[in-house]
Image: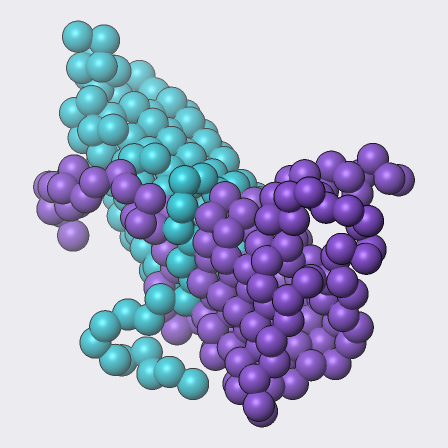
Amino acid sequence: MSLDTFETRTAGAPASATTPLLNVLGSSAKLEGKFEISDSIQIECEVGGEMRVGGKIVIGQSGTVHADIHTVDAVIMGRYEGNLVATGDVEITATGRATGNIETDSLVIAKGGFFNGNVTKIREAGASQSTPRSLYLLEERRTAAR
Amino acid sequence: MRGQSTGAPVTLLAVTGQSAKMKGKFEIADSVHVECEVGGELIVGGQLVIGERGNVAATVRTVDAIVHGTYEGDMVATGTVEISVTGRVTGNIETDSLVIAKGGFFNGSVIKKTRAAAGATTTTKTTEDYDDDKLAIAL
């Protein structure tokens, strides 16, 4: 592909919030490390490590995630293993397979969905949370508690 | 699971929003488009595109690379490397084909891949070869 076509493409695309910040295409991908994402992420590949998501994490049907996750909302349609802290809602769909600990106030497991592990309520664990949807506030409290 | 030969490429991972920062080891069979901060090690079996807002500080092994944003590190590309007019590259590039657009910035050395593989003394081009491009920025 020539440079010219790329320039017009990038110039034509407005830098809106919907433009993907990272887009991986192809047949397979394996990512491991630390991820800090201000908004949302959709995963259809293998991901490991540590993730901080300020919005929504969606693990697609072909996604496999082995990671400790701090997020607001989570939708698990694929495989997940690890410790998940979600200040919003967690949903395990009919195709979802989750193993580990989930800390959330709202957990939905669809019929057929699989979950093996513990669920902890955030409100009980962290006393009175004035703003339960703030991920960073929660994290600050956790580190302060140590 | 999903055939490689299917026309439209399958999105394996999509990050949306205002900002994202990731560091680690990424192995990608085909291609990746980066518009955020990425560090660590990237192994790409196809094309790596660093967008205008992209900032990559990583060791990269790829086939093709197109840099519209900022890249820092050592890159090995078996195909073509293109630094566009908005591209800023610092580091070493090992490739047989490097294109720097007028206005594009490159600071580092280029090693020809075939000669490096043949074991002959590598011809290392210094940045002086790209002074024209640097001048274009200054003007």
The cyan one among the chains is B
The answer to whether A61 is drawn above or below residue B47 in the figure is below
Q: Position of residue A79 (x, y in %)?
A: 59, 77
Which residue occupies the extreme bottom position in the image?
Answer: A112
User: Is B35 situated left or right of A1 in this image?
Assistant: right
User: Is B37 situated left or right of B83 in this image?
Assistant: right
State the colouring used for the structure image. Answer: by chain
Q: Residue at x 29, y 30 (%)?
A: B87
From the viewer's side, name the closer residue of A102 and B101. Answer: A102
From the viewer's side, name the closer residue of A52 and B42. Answer: A52
The answer to whether B56 is drawn above or below residue A31 in the figure is above
Give the quadrant of residue B86. Answer: top left
The mark total stands at 0
Q: Residue at x 73, y 37 (%)?
A: A140
User: Is A12 situated left or right of B80 in this image?
Assistant: left
Give the quadrant of residue B1. Answer: bottom left
Q: Position of residue B36 (x, y in %)?
A: 42, 41
From the viewer's side, name the closer residue of B126 and A21. Answer: A21
Mark yes or no: residue B114 visible. Answer: no
Q: Position of residue A89 (x, y in %)?
A: 58, 64
From the viewer's side, name the closer residue of A28 and A125. Answer: A125
Q: Residue at x 22, y 34 (%)?
A: B84
The answer to whether A8 is drawn above or below residue B91 in the figure is below
The purple one among the chains is A
Which residue occupies the extreme right position in the image?
Answer: A146
Picture quarter with the C terminus of chain A:
top right
Which residue occupies the extreme top position in the image?
Answer: B139
Mark yes or no: residue B71 visible. Answer: yes
Q: Residue at x 31, y 16 (%)?
A: B128
Q: Position of residue A93 (x, y in %)?
A: 53, 80
